[in-house]
Image: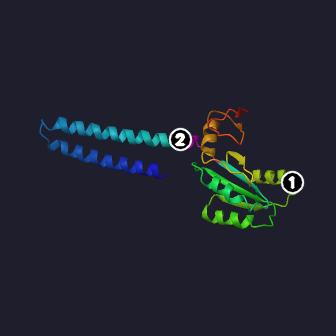
Amino acid sequence: MQELNDLRVKVLGKKGELTEILRGMKDLSPEERPVVGALVNTVRDEIESAISSAEEILKQKELEKKFSIIIPLYNAEETIDRCMNSIVNQNYNNYEVIVADNESTDNSLSIIKKYQKEYGFINIFKSKSSLAGGVKNLAIKKCSGDYFIVVDSDDYVEENLLMTLNKKINKEYSLIRYNAYHNLENSENMFITNIA
């Protein structure tokens, strides 16, 4: 996490500044000490602010759920690019994609393999189930996320789908069903229930 690393570098730099200032205080005249004391307080405040920011980032990461996006695939070469582009361009990072290919005979699988080479979070497995539900059930068993989402190969999603779902889930909901044709942020058609 780059943000935390940047904060760590900042804190270490400020800590070094503070150490140097404190070492030099013994050589100061009584008139100079209040000025340096104010500088010490400023540096301490900056250190506390950086630590607080780091704690907030860690808290947010703790609330971030992992999603598994399941894409049942069968002869979808006409639509799979749009679907995959919408999925790999999410503004949320903690997710995997599981493509369940049901013996496609067109170019669908080679399109998915191009995405897989570019994005390390895409997994492909082949299924020989004659039922769409059977393919989805096999894919669910391969999920490593906290929650899963099924996106059909002829569908696409908004870039904020996972971020929005994560916010809703963190309000103690464990099942979210929504109308795929409405904006999630403002949808009146969202049904949310807590199932224990």
Q: Which mark lies nearer to you, 1 or 2?
A: 1
Amino acid on which the number 1 mark rests in the picture: Leu
Residue drawn at x 66%, y 59% as measured from the top left: 122
Q: Is residue 168 magenta?
A: no
Secondary structure found at label 1: loop
CB-based contact (under 8 Å), mark 1 and mark 2:
no
Circle nearer the N terminus (1, 2): 2
Q: Which residues are magenta?
A: 59-66
Q: Position of residue 31 (x, y in %)?
A: 12, 36
Secondary structure found at label 2: helix
For the C terminus, which image quadrant?
Answer: top right
Whether 144 is drawn above or below 165: the answer is below
- Dividing the picture into quarters, in which one does residue 114 lie? bottom right
Residue under circle 2?
A: 60
| Side of 15 relative to 183 (left or right) | left
- Dividing the picture into quarters, in which one does residue 180 lie? top right
Q: Of helix, strand and loop, which mostly describes the magenta segment?
A: helix
Most foreground residue, 19 or 168: 168
Most foreground residue, 93 or 178: 178
